[in-house]
Amino acid sequence: LCGNYTIGGEVADFQSLGQAVDFLNNAGITCAVDFKLRSGAYTENVEINRIIGTSETNNVTFESETGDSSAAILQGTFTLKNTSNIILKKLRYNGCNLFNTKSIRILNCLLNGPVGVYDSSQNLIISRNNFDGGGSGIVLRNTLNNVQITGNLINNNSYSGNYVGIGAWGESHGLKII
């Protein structure tokens, strides 16, 4: 893959988010890839694994086609595993899980559930998001390096028991919460 692609709606490059992710997982990329999600609800469970060809200059971006973070709604589970150089931008979703990831950016999103960061993830940027509802905003677990959490609004969460806005458990180095 290389270039810009649309997901969902009429006359799209990929009819579903799952179809795009499956293709991405299998084919890899040869240059930067930008997936524009058309307005609507995507009720799929997707998992992005190691993508061949990603680098600091060859990122994979998933973002709302309209630029409105409430227009493209991911209602299933969204998981990143053993992957790097992914950008999630201007989307609405129920949270996501990052396992052993590197150089992931979550920017200007509306989240109705937590961002779970696990297992040696590093160089993450979680910035300018609105966490609205749910029991936790950001959950950091296990060994993490150079994680930055800046300019987020964590709003209308309910906290009881062990639930928190931003929680870090385990070994973290270079963690910045601003």
Image (cartoon, rainbow, N blue to C red):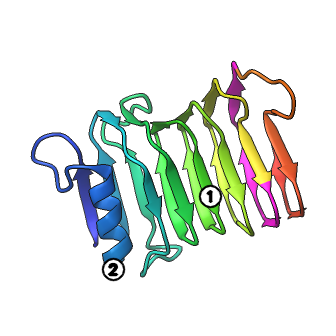
Residue visible at 36% across and 39% down? Answer: 43
Give the residue drawn at x 75%, y 46%: 139
Q: Residue at x 35, y 61 (%)?
A: 21
Q: Which residue is mark 1?
A: 98
Q: Residues within 10 Å of mark 1 (few under 14, many from 20)?
A: many
Q: Quadrant of residue 26?
A: bottom left
For the N terminus, give its image quadrant. Answer: bottom left
The x, y position of residue 171, in whole percent, is: 90, 63
Answer left or right for 45 relative to 135. Answer: left
The type of residue carrying mark 1 is: Leu
Q: Which residues are magenta?
A: 141-156
Q: Which residue is mark 2?
A: 30
Q: Earlier in the sequence, mark 2 or mark 1?
A: 2
Separation of disc 2 and disc 1 at Cα?
Answer: 23 Å
Is 146 located above or below residue 14 in the figure? below
Residue 176 seen in render: yes
For the point 33% across and 65% down, the residue is 22
Which labelled disc corresponds to residue 51? none
